[in-house]
Amino acid sequence: MDRDASSKPSSLFTEALHVWRRRAEEKDWDVVESIAAFAQPAGMTVQTVWEELRDMVVDDLKAAGPIDVVLIQCHGAMVSQACLDCEGELMSMLRDIAQQAVIGLELDPHNHLTARMLKACALIVSFKEYSHIDATPRA
């Protein structure tokens, strides 16, 4: 797990973070970065692991103070032992904190787009290509 992934070499899982940071810095905007993590898909996520990851992102947003924009890159099909819509749960929690912010979500093309994600986000963009060659242009 990284809280400064955009300062390290880019990978498929951090490409969007690099684009977003570069664009924000071009406008002289402040950037607050939360965690970047990846796990190989292999079934349900252990509930306590999901809660810890989710809470890290939520706590980082709370600590950041007033925010204008929240941008998140997720797979979009994560399930835990007690939550069938992890991304929707996360985005709803972020919306509760940053009620006036523009919240954007970039998803893998294998996502399970849910009503909860749609309600919480101002915009959602999915990769169009498999094998995920368009993460940067989609960001």
Image (spheres, rainbow, N blue to C red):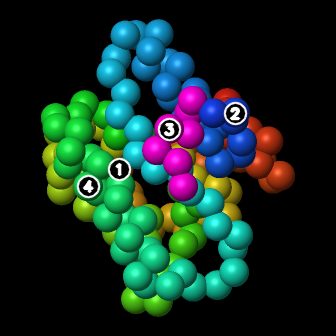
- Badge 2 marks a residue whose secondary structure is loop
Which residue is pictured at 54% across the width and 72% down the height?
Answer: 78
Mark in front: 3 vs 1: 3
Q: Is residue 88 visible?
A: no
Identify residue for label 1: 121
- Mark 1 and mark 4: span between their CA atoms? 19 Å
Q: Quadrant of the C terminus?
A: top right
Contact, mark 1 vs mark 4 (Cβ under 8 Å): no
State the separation of the CA atoms marked 4 and 3. 16 Å
Marks 3 and 1, how far apart at CA:
24 Å
Specify start and end residues of the magenta stretch as a single range.
1-7
Q: Determine which residue is flagged by label 4.
A: 59
Return the residue at label 2: 9
**Would you call the spot at circle 3 few (<14 residues within 10 Å), some (14-19), or many (20 or more)?**
few
Label 4: how many Cα within 10 Å (few below 14, some 14–19, many 20+): some
Residue positioned 38% across, 70% down in the render: 52
Q: Is residue 46 left or right of residue 33?
A: right
Q: Earlier in the sequence, mark 3 or mark 1?
A: 3
In primary-sequence order, the first of circles 3 and 2 is 3
Whether the residues at callouts 2 and 1 have beta carbons within 8 Å, the answer is no
Could you tell whether 87 is left or right of 130 in the image?
A: left
- Position of residue 116 measured from the top left corner of the image (x, y, whole percent): 35, 66
Give neighbour class at mark 1: few <14, some 14-19, many 20+ (Cα, 10 Å): many
Please state which amino acid type lies under the numbered disc 2: Pro
Q: Can residue 33 be found in the magenta stretch?
A: no
Q: Would you say residue 3 sits in the magenta stretch?
A: yes
Residue 4, disc: 3
Give the Cα separation between the discs numbered 2 and 4. 25 Å
Name which residue type carries label 1.
Cys
Q: Which SS class for mark 3? A: loop
Alpha-carbon span between mark 3 and mark 2 = 11 Å
Residues 25 and 139: in front is 25
